Amino acid sequence: MAKKEMKKMALRDTLGDKIFYTINAIFLGLVALIVLYPLYFIVIAAISDPDAVLAGDVVLYPVKLNFDGFVKIMERKDVWLGYRNTIIYTALTVILSIIVTVPAGWALSRNTLPGKKAFMIYFIIPMFFGGGLIPFYNVMSSLKLVNTIWAIVLPSILSVWNLFMTKTFFQSSIPDTLIEAATIDGAGSFRIFGEVVLPLSKAIIAVMALYYAVGQWNSYFNAMIFLQNENLYPLQLVLKEILIASESTVGGSGETILQQYRLANQLKYVSVIVSSVPVLLLYPFVQKYFAQGVMIGSLKG
Protein backbone atom coordinates (compact mmCIF):
# COMPACT_ATOMS: atom_id res chain seq x y z
CA MET A 1 0.00 0.00 0.00
CA ALA A 2 2.79 2.35 0.88
CA LYS A 3 4.49 1.75 -2.45
CA LYS A 4 1.26 2.43 -4.35
CA GLU A 5 0.75 5.69 -2.47
CA MET A 6 4.32 6.77 -3.23
CA LYS A 7 3.81 5.98 -6.91
CA LYS A 8 0.60 8.02 -6.95
CA MET A 9 2.39 10.95 -5.27
CA ALA A 10 5.25 10.71 -7.78
CA LEU A 11 2.73 10.62 -10.64
CA ARG A 12 0.84 13.56 -9.17
CA ASP A 13 4.06 15.53 -8.73
CA THR A 14 5.11 14.77 -12.29
CA LEU A 15 1.74 15.87 -13.63
CA GLY A 16 1.95 19.04 -11.55
CA ASP A 17 5.43 19.71 -12.92
CA LYS A 18 4.16 19.28 -16.47
CA ILE A 19 1.31 21.69 -15.84
CA PHE A 20 3.72 24.21 -14.32
CA TYR A 21 6.15 23.91 -17.24
CA THR A 22 3.30 24.29 -19.72
CA ILE A 23 1.94 27.41 -18.05
CA ASN A 24 5.47 28.78 -17.73
CA ALA A 25 6.18 28.15 -21.42
CA ILE A 26 2.94 29.83 -22.46
CA PHE A 27 3.63 32.84 -20.25
CA LEU A 28 7.22 33.23 -21.49
CA GLY A 29 6.00 32.80 -25.06
CA LEU A 30 3.54 35.66 -24.60
CA VAL A 31 6.23 37.85 -23.07
CA ALA A 32 8.59 37.04 -25.96
CA LEU A 33 5.81 37.87 -28.42
CA ILE A 34 5.17 41.22 -26.74
CA VAL A 35 8.88 42.04 -26.91
CA LEU A 36 9.67 40.70 -30.37
CA TYR A 37 6.59 41.71 -32.35
CA PRO A 38 7.34 45.49 -32.31
CA LEU A 39 10.83 44.73 -33.62
CA TYR A 40 9.39 42.44 -36.28
CA PHE A 41 6.79 45.05 -37.23
CA ILE A 42 9.49 47.67 -37.72
CA VAL A 43 11.26 45.36 -40.18
CA ILE A 44 8.18 44.48 -42.21
CA ALA A 45 6.92 48.09 -42.18
CA ALA A 46 10.28 49.33 -43.47
CA ILE A 47 10.04 47.09 -46.55
CA SER A 48 6.30 47.46 -47.18
CA ASP A 49 4.39 49.94 -49.28
CA PRO A 50 3.89 53.12 -47.18
CA ASP A 51 0.20 53.28 -48.13
CA ALA A 52 -0.33 49.75 -46.80
CA VAL A 53 1.39 50.67 -43.54
CA LEU A 54 -0.72 53.81 -43.13
CA ALA A 55 -3.88 51.85 -43.92
CA GLY A 56 -3.06 49.27 -41.24
CA ASP A 57 -2.75 46.38 -43.71
CA VAL A 58 0.75 45.43 -42.52
CA VAL A 59 0.32 43.14 -39.54
CA LEU A 60 2.04 39.77 -39.97
CA TYR A 61 3.96 40.05 -43.22
CA PRO A 62 5.20 42.70 -45.70
CA VAL A 63 2.69 44.07 -48.19
CA LYS A 64 3.86 45.17 -51.66
CA LEU A 65 7.62 45.13 -51.06
CA ASN A 66 9.07 48.61 -51.23
CA PHE A 67 12.71 49.48 -50.53
CA ASP A 68 12.54 53.18 -51.39
CA GLY A 69 13.27 54.14 -47.78
CA PHE A 70 16.52 52.17 -47.73
CA VAL A 71 17.48 53.57 -51.13
CA LYS A 72 16.86 57.15 -50.00
CA ILE A 73 18.87 56.63 -46.80
CA MET A 74 21.81 54.88 -48.44
CA GLU A 75 22.07 57.40 -51.28
CA ARG A 76 22.82 60.21 -48.85
CA LYS A 77 26.49 60.90 -48.18
CA ASP A 78 25.71 62.47 -44.82
CA VAL A 79 24.40 59.12 -43.57
CA TRP A 80 27.72 57.41 -44.29
CA LEU A 81 29.55 60.37 -42.80
CA GLY A 82 27.36 60.07 -39.72
CA TYR A 83 28.16 56.37 -39.53
CA ARG A 84 31.87 57.13 -39.65
CA ASN A 85 31.60 59.82 -37.00
CA THR A 86 29.51 57.63 -34.69
CA ILE A 87 31.95 54.73 -35.02
CA ILE A 88 34.83 57.07 -34.13
CA TYR A 89 32.95 58.57 -31.17
CA THR A 90 31.90 55.15 -29.92
CA ALA A 91 35.36 53.60 -30.26
CA LEU A 92 37.02 56.52 -28.45
CA THR A 93 34.38 56.50 -25.72
CA VAL A 94 34.70 52.76 -25.10
CA ILE A 95 38.51 52.84 -24.98
CA LEU A 96 38.70 55.88 -22.68
CA SER A 97 35.82 54.66 -20.53
CA ILE A 98 37.45 51.29 -19.90
CA ILE A 99 40.76 53.03 -19.12
CA VAL A 100 38.99 55.25 -16.57
CA THR A 101 36.23 53.03 -15.14
CA VAL A 102 38.09 49.76 -14.54
CA PRO A 103 41.08 51.17 -12.59
CA ALA A 104 38.78 53.52 -10.66
CA GLY A 105 36.45 50.65 -9.79
CA TRP A 106 39.39 48.55 -8.63
CA ALA A 107 40.72 51.37 -6.47
CA LEU A 108 37.34 51.98 -4.83
CA SER A 109 36.96 48.27 -4.12
CA ARG A 110 40.08 48.25 -1.94
CA ASN A 111 39.63 48.97 1.76
CA THR A 112 43.21 50.23 1.87
CA LEU A 113 42.45 53.19 -0.41
CA PRO A 114 43.18 56.44 1.51
CA GLY A 115 40.11 58.68 1.68
CA LYS A 116 37.82 56.00 0.25
CA LYS A 117 34.68 57.44 1.90
CA ALA A 118 35.46 60.92 0.59
CA PHE A 119 35.86 59.57 -2.94
CA MET A 120 32.56 57.66 -2.65
CA ILE A 121 30.73 60.81 -1.58
CA TYR A 122 32.42 62.75 -4.38
CA PHE A 123 31.10 60.28 -6.96
CA ILE A 124 27.64 59.95 -5.40
CA ILE A 125 26.81 63.67 -5.33
CA PRO A 126 26.67 64.13 -9.15
CA MET A 127 24.22 61.21 -9.33
CA PHE A 128 21.60 63.34 -7.58
CA PHE A 129 22.62 66.93 -8.33
CA GLY A 130 23.59 68.58 -11.61
CA GLY A 131 24.49 72.11 -12.59
CA GLY A 132 22.11 72.21 -15.55
CA LEU A 133 22.54 72.69 -19.27
CA ILE A 134 23.73 76.31 -19.30
CA PRO A 135 26.60 75.81 -16.82
CA PHE A 136 27.49 72.62 -18.69
CA TYR A 137 27.69 74.55 -21.96
CA ASN A 138 29.72 77.32 -20.32
CA VAL A 139 32.23 74.79 -19.04
CA MET A 140 32.58 73.15 -22.44
CA SER A 141 32.92 76.55 -24.09
CA SER A 142 35.58 77.74 -21.64
CA LEU A 143 37.56 74.57 -22.35
CA LYS A 144 37.35 75.27 -26.12
CA LEU A 145 35.58 71.95 -26.70
CA VAL A 146 32.46 73.25 -28.45
CA ASN A 147 32.23 72.06 -32.06
CA THR A 148 34.89 69.39 -31.54
CA ILE A 149 34.67 65.62 -31.23
CA TRP A 150 35.77 65.88 -27.58
CA ALA A 151 32.51 67.62 -26.73
CA ILE A 152 30.85 64.30 -27.56
CA VAL A 153 33.44 61.91 -26.16
CA LEU A 154 34.70 63.41 -22.89
CA PRO A 155 31.32 63.85 -21.10
CA SER A 156 30.55 60.19 -21.79
CA ILE A 157 33.68 58.43 -20.54
CA LEU A 158 32.52 57.89 -16.96
CA SER A 159 29.16 56.72 -15.66
CA VAL A 160 28.91 56.55 -11.88
CA TRP A 161 26.46 53.65 -12.13
CA ASN A 162 28.96 51.70 -14.21
CA LEU A 163 31.75 52.64 -11.82
CA PHE A 164 29.85 51.26 -8.84
CA MET A 165 28.94 48.12 -10.77
CA THR A 166 32.63 47.60 -11.55
CA LYS A 167 33.55 48.23 -7.92
CA THR A 168 31.03 45.65 -6.71
CA PHE A 169 32.28 43.13 -9.26
CA PHE A 170 35.82 43.42 -7.96
CA GLN A 171 34.68 43.13 -4.35
CA SER A 172 32.71 39.97 -5.03
CA SER A 173 34.90 38.28 -7.65
CA ILE A 174 38.52 38.97 -6.72
CA PRO A 175 39.33 37.24 -3.42
CA ASP A 176 41.60 39.07 -1.01
CA THR A 177 43.63 35.88 -0.54
CA LEU A 178 44.65 36.01 -4.20
CA ILE A 179 45.90 39.57 -3.82
CA GLU A 180 47.73 38.65 -0.62
CA ALA A 181 49.40 35.70 -2.34
CA ALA A 182 50.55 37.94 -5.21
CA THR A 183 51.88 40.47 -2.70
CA ILE A 184 53.82 37.78 -0.84
CA ASP A 185 55.34 36.71 -4.16
CA GLY A 186 56.68 40.23 -4.54
CA ALA A 187 54.19 41.69 -7.02
CA GLY A 188 53.54 45.41 -6.77
CA SER A 189 50.20 47.17 -7.14
CA PHE A 190 50.51 47.78 -10.89
CA ARG A 191 51.62 44.21 -11.56
CA ILE A 192 48.78 42.79 -9.47
CA PHE A 193 46.27 44.89 -11.36
CA GLY A 194 47.72 44.12 -14.79
CA GLU A 195 48.57 40.42 -14.42
CA VAL A 196 46.11 39.19 -11.80
CA VAL A 197 43.02 41.40 -11.77
CA LEU A 198 42.52 42.23 -15.45
CA PRO A 199 42.68 38.62 -16.73
CA LEU A 200 39.90 37.75 -14.25
CA SER A 201 37.79 40.75 -15.25
CA LYS A 202 36.85 39.94 -18.85
CA ALA A 203 33.17 39.69 -17.95
CA ILE A 204 32.83 43.15 -16.41
CA ILE A 205 35.06 44.73 -19.07
CA ALA A 206 32.85 43.30 -21.81
CA VAL A 207 29.71 44.52 -20.07
CA MET A 208 31.14 48.00 -19.55
CA ALA A 209 32.25 48.14 -23.19
CA LEU A 210 28.73 47.22 -24.31
CA TYR A 211 27.05 49.71 -21.97
CA TYR A 212 29.27 52.59 -23.02
CA ALA A 213 29.09 51.64 -26.71
CA VAL A 214 25.28 51.47 -26.75
CA GLY A 215 24.99 54.69 -24.77
CA GLN A 216 27.28 56.61 -27.12
CA TRP A 217 25.81 55.03 -30.26
CA ASN A 218 22.29 56.16 -29.34
CA SER A 219 23.32 59.58 -28.04
CA TYR A 220 22.37 62.70 -29.95
CA PHE A 221 21.61 65.38 -27.33
CA ASN A 222 25.19 66.51 -26.70
CA ALA A 223 25.82 66.61 -30.45
CA MET A 224 22.70 68.72 -30.93
CA ILE A 225 23.92 71.18 -28.28
CA PHE A 226 27.66 71.37 -28.93
CA LEU A 227 28.11 70.74 -32.68
CA GLN A 228 27.46 73.26 -35.42
CA ASN A 229 29.66 71.63 -38.06
CA GLU A 230 27.51 69.14 -39.98
CA ASN A 231 30.61 67.14 -40.91
CA LEU A 232 30.89 66.18 -37.22
CA TYR A 233 27.27 65.09 -36.80
CA PRO A 234 26.79 61.54 -35.46
CA LEU A 235 24.42 59.15 -37.19
CA GLN A 236 21.51 59.74 -34.79
CA LEU A 237 21.58 63.47 -35.43
CA VAL A 238 21.83 62.94 -39.20
CA LEU A 239 18.78 60.66 -39.14
CA LYS A 240 16.92 63.21 -37.04
CA GLU A 241 17.65 65.92 -39.61
CA ILE A 242 16.51 63.61 -42.43
CA LEU A 243 13.22 62.87 -40.68
CA ILE A 244 12.57 66.55 -40.01
CA ALA A 245 13.31 67.42 -43.64
CA SER A 246 11.09 64.58 -44.90
CA GLU A 247 8.17 65.62 -42.71
CA SER A 248 8.36 69.21 -43.89
CA THR A 249 5.32 69.93 -46.07
CA VAL A 250 6.00 73.57 -46.85
CA GLY A 251 5.29 74.38 -50.49
CA GLY A 252 4.54 72.03 -53.35
CA SER A 253 1.34 70.50 -54.61
CA GLY A 254 -0.97 68.23 -52.67
CA GLU A 255 0.50 65.17 -54.37
CA THR A 256 4.04 66.24 -53.42
CA ILE A 257 3.01 66.74 -49.82
CA LEU A 258 1.40 63.30 -49.76
CA GLN A 259 4.56 61.70 -51.20
CA GLN A 260 6.68 63.43 -48.55
CA TYR A 261 4.37 62.16 -45.85
CA ARG A 262 4.59 58.59 -47.16
CA LEU A 263 8.37 58.77 -47.38
CA ALA A 264 8.67 60.25 -43.88
CA ASN A 265 6.53 57.45 -42.47
CA GLN A 266 8.72 54.80 -44.11
CA LEU A 267 11.95 56.55 -43.12
CA LYS A 268 10.93 56.30 -39.45
CA TYR A 269 11.13 52.54 -39.63
CA VAL A 270 14.18 52.47 -41.87
CA SER A 271 16.12 54.78 -39.56
CA VAL A 272 15.49 52.45 -36.60
CA ILE A 273 16.95 49.52 -38.56
CA VAL A 274 19.90 51.48 -39.91
CA SER A 275 20.87 52.75 -36.47
CA SER A 276 20.28 49.46 -34.62
CA VAL A 277 21.99 46.89 -36.84
CA PRO A 278 25.60 47.59 -35.71
CA VAL A 279 24.66 47.24 -32.03
CA LEU A 280 22.75 44.02 -32.74
CA LEU A 281 25.79 42.65 -34.55
CA LEU A 282 28.05 43.56 -31.63
CA TYR A 283 25.95 41.95 -28.91
CA PRO A 284 26.60 38.24 -29.76
CA PHE A 285 30.35 38.76 -29.25
CA VAL A 286 29.87 39.88 -25.63
CA GLN A 287 26.78 37.82 -24.80
CA LYS A 288 28.71 35.07 -23.00
CA TYR A 289 30.16 37.65 -20.60
CA PHE A 290 27.04 39.78 -20.30
CA ALA A 291 24.93 37.78 -17.82
CA GLN A 292 27.92 36.95 -15.63
CA GLY A 293 29.17 40.53 -15.47
CA VAL A 294 25.76 42.09 -14.83
CA MET A 295 24.61 39.59 -12.19
CA ILE A 296 27.84 39.57 -10.21
CA GLY A 297 28.45 43.29 -10.53
CA SER A 298 24.96 44.36 -9.53
CA LEU A 299 23.63 41.81 -7.05
CA LYS A 300 26.52 40.64 -4.93
CA GLY A 301 28.66 42.50 -2.43
Image (cartoon, grey):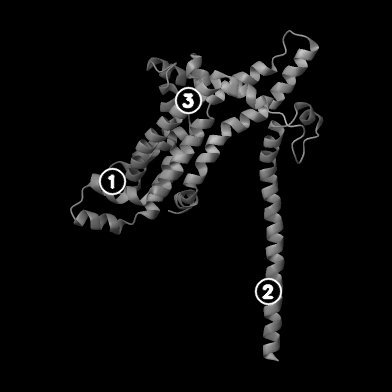
Q: Amino acid at mark 1?
A: Gly
Q: Residue at x 35, y 52 (%)?
A: 200
Q: Position of residue 237 (x, y in %)?
A: 55, 22
- What distance separates the C-alpha of mark 3 from that of mark 1? 32 Å
Residue 134 seen anywhere in this rendered image of the structure: no
Residue at mark 1:
194
User: Dividing the image into 4 quarters, which one contains the N terminus?
Assistant: bottom right
Above/below status of 218 relative to 15? above
Residue 275 seen anywhere in this rendered image of the structure: yes
Q: Quadrant of residue 18?
A: bottom right
Number of the label disc, if any, that sits on residue 84:
3
Q: Residue at x 68, y 90 (%)?
A: 2
- What distance separates the C-alpha of mark 2 from that of mark 1? 52 Å
Q: Position of residue 192 (x, y in %)?
A: 26, 49
| Residue 251 located left or right of residue 223 | right
As rendered, which of 24 and 45 lies closer to the eye? Answer: 45
Q: Residue furthest left?
A: 186
Callout 3 crowding tier (Cα within 10 Å): few <14, some 14–19, many ≥20? some
Helix, strand, or loop for circle 3? helix
Q: Amino acid at mark 2?
A: Thr
Q: Position of residue 144 (x, y in %)?
A: 38, 15
Above/below status of 144 relative to 48? above
Q: Amino acid at mark 3?
A: Arg
Q: Quadrant of residue 258?
A: top right
Number of the label disc, if any, that sits on residue 14:
2
Q: Position of residue 97 (x, y in %)?
A: 40, 35
Earlier-in-chain disc, 2 versus 3: 2
Mark 2, mark 3: which one is toward the viewer? 3
Q: Residue at x 44, y 37 (%)?
A: 160
